[in-house]
Image (cartoon, grey):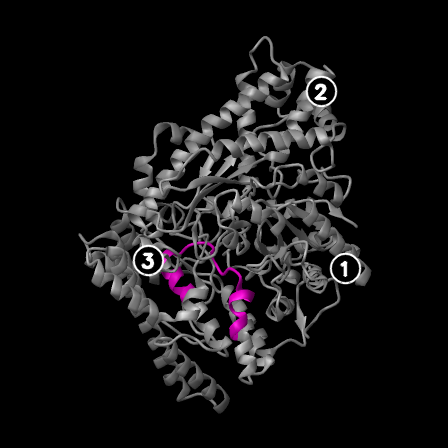
Amino acid sequence: MSQIVSEANTANIVVDGNQRIQTMKDHLFKEKRQISLERALLYTESYQKTEGEPTIIRRAKAVVHILENVAISIREGELLVGNRTIRPRSGILSPEMDPYWIMKEIDTIDGRPQDQFEFTEADKKIYREKLYPYWQGRSMKDFINQQLTDEVKDALKDEVFKLNQTDKGQGHIIMDFPGILNHGIAYYIDQLAEKIHDQPENDFFKAGYLIFVGLRNHFIRYQRLALTLAKSADSVRKNELLVIADMCQKLSQEKPSSFYEALQLLWMTSIVGQYESNASSLSLGRMDQYLYPFYEASLRAGESEAFLYEVLGDFYIKTNDVVLLRSESSAKCFAGFPTGYTVVLGGLDELGHASVNPLSYLMLDLYHEILLPQPNLSVRMNEVIPRKFLLKTCETIRLGTGIPQLFNDEVCVPAFLSKGVSLDDARDYATVGCVETSIPGKTYGLHDIALFNLLRIMELSIYDLKDKKTVSYEMLSVDIKAKIDYYVELVVKGSNIVDLGHRAYAPTPFLSVLIKDCLANGQDVTEGGARYNFSGVQGIGEANLSDAMYVIKKMVFENQELTFAELVEALAANFEGKYQSLQQHVIQDFDKYGNDNDEIDQIAASFFRHYAKELEKYENVRGGKFIPGAYTVSAHIPLGEAVGATPDGRKAQEQLADGGLSPMVGRDRLGPTAVLKSVSKLDNYLTVNGSLLNIKFQPNTLKGQQGLNKFANFLMAFTKLKIQHVQFNVQSKETLLDAQKNPAKYSGLLVRVAGYSAFFVDLNKQIQDDIIARVGHEL
């Protein structure tokens, strides 16, 4: 087993690790992140040749053109092949989605506050002269902007909500990986050929056929490259390359039979999905479940555990090669390159029994050596989880990288049942992106379609009522709920327009073939072909809203310390001048959400339930339902910038509470169990789209076997309290402050930001300060 350096693991450095894994890991970070125009240029070349053809056919031909012409390489030491770009960790563009933000930020992207990329002058010239002129007026963004109503535009301008996924293709989805691993590429080619024969007018079948043939031929390209490289390699590497060549040849025609082959097909399928969509969170689902039969088969065939460990390590490393390029505003909301290669371990089988297996343990053990942001491991908690696996999970969390995060089967399964999902499918749920829950291979959920700022709505209500002669707490509450209803209708309209934009401009036939029922229905996921169709909108600001309303209730209407008009005056003054002491009063002298206060927690539960039930009334354009979530990613900072001073003591433009269901930073004063009890009073069955709870622990509290056992018991309390999600930072404040001052010493330090982990030194100071300020609890 690899060892971690003992000095508080400040840089997440492994000693005595697997040499191949460490070499590949080092290679990833040798060069600066750079923008690659290759996909954009090839995509555009194809589109220029297919004018007038159906969009879904044009999309398929563009993907095939990329697969046939993109530069490929087999990097030193790697056992699995397939990369989006020759240069590691390059950002690729999708001007067909939105060419405008790129043009606007072309000269600032290398020096912006968050997620910088090098953009060469030569490539800037190509973008300005070739790519931008073609896509201007032809993009999905043009369609969306033209369709948005004035009311929706006004709400966006007022920053009540934010529409997402307007500049990328379909993500936040899990393809049917068990299907392609158990059947192989040729099976889908044959299936699609039969469908075309029976329904020759169906363009979806034609498009899917084109890309699956392209995938087959892409494997042949790698076979030929491996044979070429083998000619000049030393004997050890030559043998590895010849094995790669044989494997690529086999997978182009047959299904995999070994763990090595299954991982190779899994990775190449993911890469083709990336070429098609260039999207966030083409997640990987329950890898320990669908790969375990291949793992067993390889062991029976005599392959060594050490070799299988290396191959899986190669896969882990490759997930970190995909780095997403976002606009500056999006980078604020998704800071630190959350790619969304989310993997779920454990959980339940079809009988409702614990489904932990030896591969589940191996995948956690391996992460002790990888210590990188991806894959974003998750563990499914339940009341029958084996204690041994629970302790292994605790050991991994104790490393301090924020991985794995935890999901509660006791909440997630019944929540899906309430939405019409079958019991078997509900027990098979996994996670996509950060914390969104989904049914693998069967759901198109548009899980992150919008962010809905509940605190901004409260602010609008406060100022709308400021001139009323008589104001009551009940009047304010009614006004807030009425505004929630009004803006929910608008966010639904905006989200459906984005949904239609994807249908008209960005169908994904390859991905759709690997989503259940799309082949049977003869429809792309954007047309509603999937078995389950949802649209997820995140309600944000619950903690601040409940804290603020509690202060208003107590200070203004019960204690009568000041009038409502005087409170509004203090907020307008941003708690400055004569109101400085008032700010400290509301922060220090009134209880806050996260401290097991029934009255405050009930306020949070009541407003979120109202929002959730209102959202659920609406149907999306694919015939599915809108479902609520409660997570912020890192958007609690930009969303806070949209809100003035609020009665909970926030000053204008200060951040909101992190996570989604986490208490406001620094306000949880009674320990982690009190936090759990507050969150448990919300109706966690409502957050079908996902919720997020951050908790930070002092490293010393988890030391030794006693610390692990206490932590394991805490996690069982989380499970029994019926909370959907929790994740942890286990880093001392002193370490984080030192990393902020001396970033070169901490290049490998990982922290949990939101539903993902990121390198601390890659985060801007605002987010670093937020993580530092979170209360470090003890058990």
Q: Earlier in the sequence, mark 3 or mark 1?
A: 3
Q: CA distance from mark 3 to mark 1?
A: 48 Å
What range of the chain is rendered magenta? Answer: 268-294
Q: CA distance from mark 3 to mark 2?
A: 60 Å
Q: Residues within 10 Å of mark 3 (few under 14, many from 20)?
A: many
- Kindly state the secondary structure of the residue where label 3 is placed: helix
According to the picture, the residue beneath numbered tag 3 turns out to be: 519
Q: Main secondary structure of the magenta part?
A: helix
Up the image or down, 300 lies above or below 13; here it is below
Q: Residue furthest left?
A: 52
Q: Is residue 590 magenta?
A: no
Instruction: Please identify the quadrant where the N terminus is shown.
Output: bottom right
Q: Amino acid at mark 3?
A: Leu
Q: Position of residue 231 (x, y in %)?
A: 39, 89
**For the residue labelled by badge 1, is the local secondary structure a helix, a strand or a loop?**
helix
Residue 303, picture quadrant: bottom right
Q: Amino acid at mark 1?
A: Leu
Q: Is residue 274 magenta?
A: yes
Give the residue pinned by disc 2.
Answer: 555
Mark 1 = which residue?
A: 708
